[in-house]
Image (tube, rainbow, N blue to C red):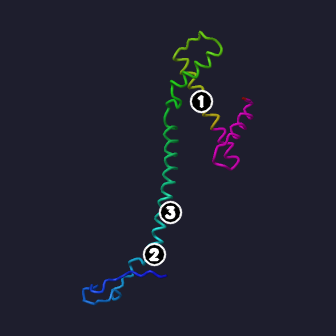
Amino acid sequence: MVRRKSIPRNRTYSSSGSTSPFDEFDSSQPTRRQSTHNRSRKSSKKRRSQKTLRTQRALLEIRKYQKSCNLLIQKSPFIRLVREIGSYFTTDLRWQSIALLALQEASEAYLVSLLSDSYLCTLHAKRITLFPTDIRLTLKLRNCYT
């Protein structure tokens, strides 16, 4: 069933005093069908903009971490981990803060190089997403079987 817009009968529509709403049809105004089409187009733009915002946020994070020379792993959890691993070997280990910092920098440099090489394996497979198999392949190529 077709819906029609109800038009009040006692209203004048033009400055000339005509009572017909069709006397002054403005073609620049969108019709009902065009407005629904524009509405769906706007919602798709909104969806696209949300997706691009997520992508841009990720790219901004990448650039931020590439520019910074700060450590990415927090110090206190890393120190706890190193002391816990050290306690497996002997109970009376004492650590200097400089030694812990050197271990943290070396481990972060190793992880960054491992992940960048793994991402090269991902690109070689014509993918974008890094999978655990890429990391395993990188470790095999480095002869590090862990």
- The correct choice, above or below, for 43 with respect to 118 in the image is below
Asked if disc 1 and disc 3 are in contact, CB closer than 8 Å, the reply is no
Q: Position of residue 80 (x, y in %)?
A: 55, 21
Label 2 packing within 10 angstroms: few (<14), some (14-19), many (20+): few
Q: Which residue is mark 2?
A: 34
- The correct choice, above or below, for 58 with respect to 77 in the image is below
Quarter of the image for residue 78 reads top right
Residue drawn at x 68%, y 39% as measured from the top left: 132
Whether residue 28 is in magenta: the answer is no
Quarter of the image for residue 8 reads bottom left
Looking at the rendered structure, the secondary structure element under dot 1 is helix
- Observer-nearest residue: 37 or 58? 37
- Observer-nearest residue: 26 or 87? 87
Q: Position of residue 134 (x, y in %)?
A: 69, 40
Give the alpha-carbon distance from disc 1 to disc 3, as whole Å: 42 Å
| Residue sticking out furthest to the front | 1
Q: Which residue is mark 3?
A: 44
- The correct choice, above or below, for 50 with respect to 65 in the image is below
Amino acid, disc 2:
Gln
Q: Position of residue 15 (x, y in %)?
A: 24, 86
Q: Which residue is mark 1?
A: 109
- The correct choice, above or below, for 16 with respect to 57 in the image is below
Specify start and end residues of the magenta stretch as a single range. 116-145
Amino acid, disc 1:
Ala
